[in-house]
Amino acid sequence: MAGPHEDFVARLHRQIDSFAREREIEKAYVEVELRDGSRFALDSISPEPGYGFITLSPQPAQDDVPEQLVIPIGAIARIEFARAVEERARLGFSIP
């Protein structure tokens, strides 16, 4: 049975896709801020492993960040969407 974390991720993917389509851009730039103040430009987000936890995959171009973070949903303080500006052109969120 799907849990609330799967619904959260599915709805977030729809919101990101909608943001990109409305602005006629190929990919949106998505950044997440955690409650501890750390910020990550995201490549993707997954509902795995579940049980209230999700997996964030930061953009590989960032220095000193892990390849993946498994965090409780409640650790997220804020999620920002933006157009992928020229200097971020190679960055963008990948919808599964």
Image (tube, rainbow, N blue to C red):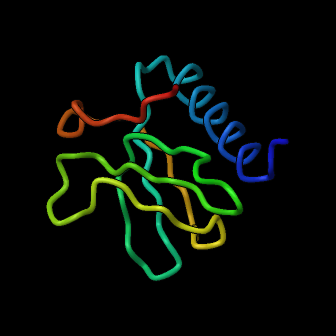
The N terminus, quarter of image: top right
x, y percentage for residue 73? 64, 64
Q: Which residue is located at x 44 percent, y 45 percent?
A: 30
Vertical order, 9 against 38 (above or below): above
Vertical order, 26 against 71 (above or below): above
Residue at the far bottom: name it.
36
- The front one of 23 and 47 is 47
**52 displayed left or right of 20:** right
Residue at the far right: name it.
1
Dividing the picture into quadrants, the one containing residue 50 is bottom right
Counting the numbered discs, the total is: 0
**48 displayed left or right of 90:** right
x, y percentage for residue 51? 71, 61
- The front one of 63 and 67 is 67
Vertical order, 19 against 82 (above or below): above
**80 displayed left or right of 73:** left
x, y percentage for residue 46? 54, 44
x, y percentage for residue 25? 43, 21
**35 displayed left or right of 82:** right
Q: Which residue is located at x 44 percent, y 33 percent?
A: 28
Dividing the picture into quadrants, the one containing residue 93 is top left
Q: Which residue is located at x 58 percent, y 27 percent?
A: 17
